[in-house]
Every structure is written in C-alpha cells, then in structure tokens.
Image (cartoon, helix red, strand yellow):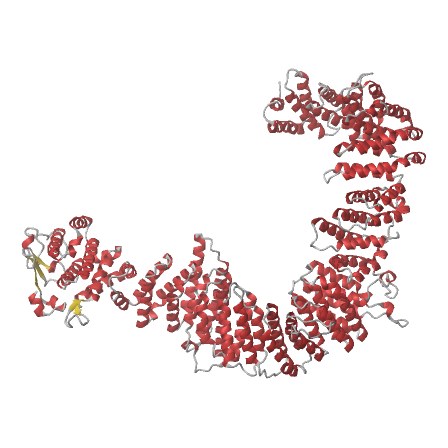
Amino acid sequence: MKTAAEHCLAALIDSVGSGGPIFRREAIGAIAKLSQNGTSAVLRFCVTWLNEHGASSTPVIQRCGVVCAMATIVGGVGDEELSTREAIALLQCGIREMTVNSDLTSELSKEALRLVVGLCVIFPAEGCRELLSSLGDNTLPHFYVLLAISHLAEKVPERILPYVKEFLTRLLPPLGIARQDNHRMLLSRACGSLAEALVKMRFDARSPLEEYNDLMYSTLNFFLGDYSRCNERRVRTLVVYAVGCVFGVCGDEKRMELAGKVAPLVIYGVRREKGHDVLFPLRGLVGFFSYVTDGVRSSLRPFVEGTLQAIMQTLEHLGAEDVETKEEIFAVIMAISDSFVAEVLAYLSAFLEAKKELHLRCAAVFILRMLVLQSRNQKLFLQPFVNDIVATVKLALGSHEDSMVRRAVVECILTICSSEADFASAVGYSDMLSYLIHCASLHDDVDEGLIAVRDISRNGLMLVASSKGALDSQLWPFIFEHMREYPAKPFLLCAFSAICNVITQLASRISHNSSCFYVDFSRHVNVPSPGMLVSVFLSQSMLIGFYRVEELLTILEAALSVAPLIDDPYAQSVEEGGGAAMPITELWSTFIPSLQQLLTTEPAREVWEVEVERLVDKTLKVKQSEEWAMHLTTECLSLLQAYQQDARMFRSALIIVGIGCSRTASRDLIASAVETAVNASNHDDPEHVIGLAKCLGYVAKKHVDTALETLCRLAKGAEKRGFFHSREKTKRVFVEGSRSVAAVGFGYACKCMDIAALPSRLDTVVFPSLLTLLREGHTPQCQISLFEGCRLVGTAIARLDSYFFKCRDEFILSSVRFMQMTSKKKTKEETNPTAFAALESIVSCTLLPPLGDNGTAALIELVKVSVTECHMVNAEKDVNVTNLFVQVLRHRDCRYAMRVLGELAPLTVLENDGARCLAVKLVVTVLAACRASRESGADGSAEQPHTLVSMGCILGRLVPRMMDRCPSVRMEAANGIVSGIQTARLFMENPQQMEEEVTEEILKLGKRAHAFVDDGTLSSEKEAVSVVKSMCTILAQQLQQREDTTALIKALLFNSIFDTQKYAATGACITMHGLIRGCGGVLDASDVREVFDGLIAALQRDNLPEQVRSGVQTSIRNLTRHHVAPCFVALLRSQLPHSEAVINSFGAIANDTTLGELLVQHILDFVLNSPTTIAAAPTANKPSDLQVVSPIVLSAVCAVGWVAQTDRGASVCRNHRASLYMAIVLHLSVCHRMNDHDAVVMSGTALKHVTCGTVDDVTVVRFDRYGWKNFLRSRNIFWLLRKLFVIGAEKGWGTATRWTVGRPPTQMDGFRWSLLNPRSLLMSWQSLCFPTVLMSLQPTGKLRLVSVASLLRMRWGTKNLCDR
C-alpha cells in the first residue's frame, strides 16, 4: 500500500509531463523539495518509476522531467546520504537514460549526463567503473559516455586520476576506427580532458608520469595522423586541445622529438579560431607549455614568439564580454612565463618599440601585466627581470592620448608596485610613478574613459602609499619632486589631494626614522624648497569651494606631516647638545587642528579664507626672518604661472604674495611683486579682482603709499590714447576691470593700513577716488566691486575712535544715484545685496556728523524701492536692507520711524514673495526702533507714535501674512505681531509689558503657520482656521486701547479681507469677525457707521470669496448685536432700490432670533411714526412745495419684505402680520396717491413677500393664481386689497380666533371679519392692529377711512385725514 508521500510523488511525476515550462519547472522543484525529508526514498521511487515505465510507453518530456529532478537532488546531497548500492543503481539508471539515443541535442540525454556526472563526483570509483563497463571492446563508445568522461575529468581531475590510464587504454582502439566527425570530436575531447587532468595534477599524481609516456606517445600519434588534417571546426579545435594536452604529459625525449610537429599545429589552431572557438586551442596551448624541463626548453624556445603572436592576434578580436577567453590567455601566459620570461619580455619590448596600433599595444601591456601577476614565487622568480620589466613598461608610457592604453599601463604599474619583487631598485621606477601621478592629474573635462583612468590612478596611489615595504624610501623624496613641475605642468595640480594622501601615509610610517624622513634641500635639488612647499600647501588649503571637506582635511594633514621638513634641520647650525628649532612645526601643530575642527562646521568661504590668511601671516612671522619672508614671497610669485588655469588658485596665491610683502621691508621686492601681480592678473575675472585687491591691501599694511599709488593708477581704468601717443610696451594697458580692482583694493587697504595713517588717506586719496569711480564706473563687475569697497571702507572707519565724516551725505547721494542709474539698466535683476551692506557700513561707521535730511530721505526712498523691486526671498538682501534702515533711524533718533511705518505697511501685500517678506521685516525693524526710542526716552512726550500710525493699522496688515503662501513671510509676520503688540502696550497711558507666555504662544502659532501646507484637504483648512482663531483671541486680549482695536478692525475690513491670496483673505476675515464679536462694543457711533458701511460695501464686491462673504455677513450680525439702533438706521438709509448686499444684510440680521424681533419692531415704529411723504428738492422745472414718497420709509417697507423671506424673519413677521399688513397697505395707498410707480412696485413687492412668509401655502397658491402683479396696478389695487381682507377673514387673521371668526361684533370682542357680505363688509382694524381704525370697502371702489388717535400718530394731520 502506497504512502501519502508516494501518492504525492506519483502525482508530481504525472504533472511533469503536462503543462507549460513554468509549470513543469515548479513540479520538478516540488519533487526536489520532497527529497529534503528522504533523499534515498525519493530517488528510489524515481528509479522504480523509470524502470516500470519503458521509454516507448511514456512521453520523453515526462522522463526528462523525472531525470532532471533526480539530477537536482543528487547535486545537493553528499556521499553520506546515499549508500554505494543506491549510487550504483542510480548510475546504471542514469547511463541507461543517457544512452537511450545518439542525438547530441536530446534534453533527456543531457539531464541524464548531469545526473551521471553528479554521481561520479560523489562516488568516483563506482562511477568510473560503470563508465568503463559502458566502453565496449574495439567498439565505438556512446557519445554521452565520452561526454561524461570529459566532464568528469574537467570537473574533478583529482578524483579521476587513478582511472586515467585505464580510460586511455580503452579509448585507443576507438580512436583508430572512428570515422564520423561526432565520434572524433568527442574522442578528442575525452583524451584531451584526461591528459589535462594529468597536467593539472602533476604534483599530486600517485604514480610517476613516466608510466604514461608510451600510452601518451601512442595517443599523440593518432592525433597527428588523420585527426590533424580534419577541417571541420568543431573537430579541429578539440584535436588541437587534445594534441597540446597529450604533448604536455609525454616524456622529455618524446617532447623534444615531436615538438617540431606539435607546435605549428597547436599555434596555428589558436591563430585560426575566433571568439568562443579559441577556448579549447588555448587550453591545448597551456598543456603544450606546461612543466618545461631544461632539456625541453631549447626545443620549445623557437616557438615562443609564434605563440605570443597568436595570443596577440586573439586579444585583438576580444571584447569586454570574453571573460572566459581572457582567463585562458592568462593561463597560457602563466605556463609560458614559467620557463620563458626573458623571451616574453624581449618580444614585448620589440613589439612596443615598434609603435603598433593602440589596441595591440594595449594587448602587449595586458600580457606584461599577466606575466607579473601570475608568477607563483614573485620575489624569487621575477627579481632577475625587474629592470627588463620596468624598461618594457616605460616603452608604453609614451601613449598619452588613448584611455584604453592608459588604463592598461596604469593597471600594469599598479601590479608591479604591489608585487613581492623589489621593483623599487629598478632603473626607471620613478618614471612609472610619475606616469601614475600624471594620470591621476586628469581634470574633469576629459572623456569618461580617461576619468576612469584617473580614478584608478588615484586609488592606485593610495594603495601604493598604504603598502609597507621598500617603496617608502623611494617614494618619500620623490613624491615632492613633481611639485617642481607645477609652473610648467599646471595640470598636475588636479592630483594634489591624492598626493597629499600619499604624503600622509608615508610620513606616518617613516617619520620616526630621521635619516629617511628629513630632506637635505641642498643635495636633493629636485625637491621643492621649503618656501615652495609652504606656498603650495597653504594656497591649496584656502580652496574650500574647490576641494571637498574630506580633501581639505587630507591637505591639512599632509601639511602638518611636512612641517618638520619645512623647518629644514639640515640648514640650521645646531650647537652641541641642542636640537634644531622647529617653529613652523610647533605653530602648525596647534593651528592646523583648529582649522580642521572649523572645517567640520562647513564655514563660509570668507570665514575660512580669513583663518588661513592668519595661518600664513603667523607662518611668515614665526621665523622672525626677513630672508624667510622674501623667500616665501618669491616662491609664491613663481606659482602664479601654474595657477593661471584656475582663478581660485590664482586668488589664493595673490593673497599669500600680499601677506609676504607685508612682512618684508625690501622696496625692490615690493615693487617687483606688485608689478608682477598686477600684470599677471586678469582684471576682468572676479576671483583675480578680489585676490589682487587683497594683495594690495596687505601691501598697504607696511607700504601704504606704494599700495595707494598702484590703486590710483588702476582706478583710471582704460586710458584714452591718441593715434600718435606712445606707450611703454612693458607696462600693462589697464581695462575697465582695473577699476574694479581699485574699488575693492581701496577697501582692503583701509582695512589693513595702520590706524594712524587712515584719516589722512581717507580724505586725500580714498574718498576722492571712490567718488570718481561712482561717477564713471558702469560695468556690472565694477558696481559690485564698488559696493564691496565701500563696505570695507566703512568697516575701517569704525575702527577709529572719532572720525568726522564730512563728505558722507555727498557719498551717500552719489551711491544712491549710482544704484538708481544701474537699476534702470536692469529689467529683472534686483539691486545687489552688497550695495545695501555698503551703505549700512558707511552710515553706521560713525555718528559724526548725523545724516542730513537729503541723505536720510534718499536712503528711506531707496529702502522702499528695494521692497518693490524684490522678486524672491533673499535672506542676505533682507538682512542688509534691514540693517541699513536701522542705522538710518539711529541717526535720526527714530523721528522718521512712524512716518515710514505708515508707508511700509501697504507694501506687505505686494505680489512677489520676496517683496512681502522684506516689507514685513522692515515693519518689525521700525517697531523695534520705536520701542527702543520710547524706552530710552529719546522721543520725549511731544510726539506719540500712535498719533501718526495706530498699531492696529499695522497689525491689520500683518495678520493676513500669517497665512501667506510664502512660509518665510508667515514666520516674519508672527514676529511682527509680537512686536506690534509690544509697541501698542508700551505706548499706552500706563505702559505695560507683554507677558513672555503670550510671546511664546504667538511664536508657536508662527511655527505652525510656517509648517502649514495647503494640500486642499479639510484637515489643512481646519489647521489654518485654528491658527487664525488662536491669534485673534490673543489680539483681543492684548490690545487694551480702543483706538488700536478700532484701527485693527478697519484695517482688516478695508484692506486685508480683499487680499489676493485665499488663506490670507480668509484669515483676515476670521480675525475681523472675532474682534467684532468680542470687542465690537468699544466702537463709537462714527466708527460703527463707518465699519457698517464698509461691511455693506464689501458684500457688494463680485469677486469676494464665499468664505469671506459669509464671514462679512456674520460680522454684520455681530456688529448689530453691539449697536442695534445705529446699525438699523444705517441699513434703512441704504440707497434704493436695495442692493444684493443690503438684502443679504437684512437677512443676516433677521435670522438672529433677538435681532429679528427688534428689527421688525423698529421698522413698524419707523413706518408708523415717520412722515410718508417729504418735500421734494426744488428744481427749475418743479415747484418747491412738491411732495414725494419718503425714501427712508419706503426703504423700511422694503426691508420688511426682505425680512419675511428668511425663516426666522418670517416667524417674527407672522407674530406682527396684522400690523405689518396695515402699515404696508397704508404706505401702498400713499404711493398710489403720489403716483410713484417705482415706490408702488417696491411696496407691492414687500407686501407680496410678507404675505408669502406669513400665510399658508394654499393662500399663496390663490394669490399666485390671481396674480401678484395686480398689486402694482392702480385700477385693481382696491379690489385686490378687498380680496386680501376676504381671505384674511376666512383664515382668521388678526386677533380673531377660530371660535369668533364670522360672528357679529360685540361690546367685549369688537368687530370680527364676516363672510356673509364681503362687499358691504365693515372691517375693524381692531382685528388687525389698532382697535380705533375702521375700514370699509364700498361698491364704488373708493376707500373711506375713519381714523382716531392712531391716525394722528401717523402725522397725516387732521384736515387731510378728514378729506380722505
């Protein structure tokens, strides 16, 4: 009975033969996975299944799947998991399946071959015996049996070794009778594999190889016969393989005898094949040159050159993907070099010397590298040939144009440097290192291939430096020599950081050995002098933007390593018992670590440059030697030529030259250095400009007149020469860029010169020259340089205790005109931030004399213009403009602050983000200045800032910016609100400080606003509303003066809610609504009318966002709650016909339960107690006593209609409908009498709205059927009114109840509406509103009124009343 596992296996085997490839692969994997719990059981089941199901009765694909599963299982097991008996059964099964057909493409046979080879690897003895038993006597073996022997020999040569002789003996007879190409091909491969196994395992053979001599000789003769003449490619390649391998196993006598026959055959076989077909011939070539004894060497030597030529030809056609072929070539070189190193080197030298094609030269270098790389015992084997190898490499160093050759040479050099042999003593070794340095110096503009060569070279240099050995003494002095070549070969500087890494590594190993470490500069003339080393290292250390931080750290570490060399102990006369002085070492050992620490903080370029300049100055000073300063200055001047390729390097060298000049008194050197620096510089390059200016500034430290004279010459710019004007050819003709040098140079000169000489030079030289440049310099570079120069001059003046800057106003006005003139030329560019920094420096440098009115006005206007021209947020410019403004206010004791504040506040809504941000920052600055002035008492009590600009107006501009689209503006707005509240509280009658908790809360809201992201979701809107509401609460609590609150509400209403940004307008509206709701009661009558009219005007805007519109309507209702009568009056006095905004306002008020009742009562009282007609304005065509309908009363009547259209308003009107009907009907009759059609239309419309809002739906339908338009026609109105009262009587309007409707009047109840006779009905106004008013409708259609005291209240007059 089968187990569950067997059922599962049977099902999986059935699945192997069906489905697609993926399904079958999964089924095979499942079978293999089942074997994890029982390998033997699964394999036995598969063998049984194959035995029970014959090949003819099952699909081939199914059998193939089963065998594949078995091969997979066998490939993952060990010999302990299978018994010998099971292995034999599997081998027999596999061989049977493998030999079931003779098709070399059969998948079943291939899988069975895999199974058999896998079993033979685990059980070599059983496998070889089974394979031997498959070889018949004097019969041709099966194809796959031969393949199994070949694969086994190639895969595990050590395991097949005991059976090689028996296999070869059994294969010799078939070699003689084989005629088919397939048989010859496979027999050749089998014999070659067996022979190759012997070659590979020569030193591990259990029996001496002499016993194979006769057998191999016989085998070789077979192949040298008909086999060698076969032209079929698949046969001839394997014949060459077999011939070469069998030859390698023959005895020395036979090899010497047959070398002349075998060598041409093998070499030609390699040369003839291409691509993948050359693999087997190359393996034959390996066997051919294996284990060459002294006796055989002379016989094979003539064929070495031909072999190398064949290999070169093969390498010529190889691509990057032919990795396997390259490995075989490597094996060939390894075999040849065991015995023929000199011959290989001679061939390669001749080949490289012949200047062959680049790819062939590359192949030759590749062979040379493999020759060095493959040697088993390099130190013993290669040492006699180190000079020849280095000489051969040098022949390849001349090719500098091809990246492929360069890469091959670099890799070969690195292989040589890492070899165990001592190549450092070879002649020409330094040339290889120089080549490596040259390749490491390639710049970034080369192609990708050369960039790869550069990276390999730099990595190689670091590898060489990190390798301990004899190279240390060879590299240490040599590594500095290439620095001598910098002026002639500037490109070498590209590898400077890599060289510094090498220097650091070497110094760390040999610094303890003074004899190796210290250099005698008098003897090593090729090593740069100490001054050159200092110039190179310190000038390169300045390049913080050029090098990465890691590279700069390496350069500084290398500088620290070479500091003892710079101190030059050999040049010092040391007394007995004393040591050499090491001043530079001591200085650098303390200063450079601090620089490295600073470097980790990523400092700005200016900060870093100043620190390195300090190190240069201390380095010049520490030796206290005039000669040292002159020596270093001279050496640095020589570097200017090398640094021409990079402006940043040139700048650093100029700075060091200037510092050197400041430490020497030699006038000749100073004059020569200044002239060289001026002539070598490119005055149109910004880096050169700054470098030369700094250089001249340092020169002014000790040689003021020389520096200023040179700057004055440069300030003249391009000289205008006539046609016949001669000039000295040795002197440079200055260009416009020279003015830039002069402008910045004057600044650095003032900064560096002695403070005692500064005042006189400022008045006589510097300011006249700068004023001239301000008038004449118009190029962009000159403008920037002028600003920078002025900034530095201001900084220099600040060093003086008291300096009377008498020409400051003139200087400022010239600067402002200069900036305005340049800004007109620019379309989209902003004024450079340096300009504001320059003016700030000039204004703040001294307070004597104070700024004049003209200068102050010009600067303030410049500040305002800087806001309007700002396009984007520029932190540097904002800081400079703000600082300038602070200094202007400081000069004028903040008397201009509030006036300017009122001008700056409207700029906070400009379109550009940068403009708004700067405007807010300036507002904050002014507020801070006002507080400072108030606290110090500078402004006294005569001028209170809030009398000019209320803080509420300012805060009203800042609140919307809390929700600005620019995050930077939001944070600045929060700071502004803090500053505004602090200022407002400070200017109260009883000044109070704002609590710290409030400040922190506002700043927290600012951070929330800064982090706010408008992603269009509900959560983002809630976050924005939350921030604004919290800010509104703080404002309501902190603003304790009525004037500030009123001004804030007005600023929000008249400006901020109309902001073009969605969230800004919404935030302003929410804040306004909150303030009106919480603080609206503090508004006085005039403010209430202004605010209310403003709210109505805001609603009349068509482009008002819905959220803002809703907030304004809510604000109207909240304001009315605080001021009921003024708001009602303001609404009723609205212009007729009412606008949509007024109608909505009535609706907003009516929807409030309390306000709706008060509004209806106010309207009734107003209509019934106001004259319905007024005298018309007299004109030429109208008499003066003409009466017209009162517009205010008409507005009140219309208002009732708008109120009745709202839900809550209709409810209120229902409670007063009788009174409302009476009032509207009376007013409607007046409008008919006055023949005012427009008033009739508006009153009739109001009556319609009131009726619809106070009756049931059935009544409305009845009126709809009759037609509301009849209210508007004079001839129908009384009939319609009669219908109205009839319906009213039917419905029980007025004070009648359902029990009294239709009953005759009594003394107690008065008159009720009767349904009996409507035409003669006397209707009592008691049932409607007033008990003293009666109305009757006569058949004639005329209205007769009987009035008593109530009509008198309506001010109609007794006479008119009786007439009516």
Task: Pinpoint residue 569: horizontal percent, then vertical percent.
Answer: 85, 68
Identity of the residue drawn at 76% across and 20% down: 142
Quadrant of the rendered image containing residue 145: top right
In the rendered image of this protein, does residue 332 appear above or below residue 223? below
In the rendered image of this protein, does residue 814 appear above or below residue 1287? below
Task: Pinpoint residue 96: horizontal percent, then vertical percent.
Answer: 72, 19
Quadrant of the rendered image containing residue 770: bottom right
Say if residue 124 shows up in the picture.
no
Q: Quadrant of the C terminus?
A: bottom left
Tell which of 1301 and 61 is nearer to you. Answer: 61
Task: Pinpoint residue 788: horizontal percent, then vertical percent.
Answer: 61, 72
Task: Pinpoint residue 691: horizontal percent, then vertical percent.
Answer: 69, 69
Quadrant of the rendered image containing residue 340: top right
Q: Residue furthest front?
A: 724
Tell which of 930 and 725 is nearer to you. Answer: 725
In the rendered image of this protein, does residue 139 appear above or below residue 986? above
Say if residue 71 shows up in the picture.
yes
* Image-based side of 577 in relation to 118, left or right: right
State how many labels appear. 0
Tell which of 1219 and 343 is nearer to you. Answer: 343
Tell which of 1357 and 812 is nearer to you. Answer: 812
Q: Quadrant of the N terminus?
A: top right
In the rendered image of this protein, does residue 129 appear above or below residue 1334? above
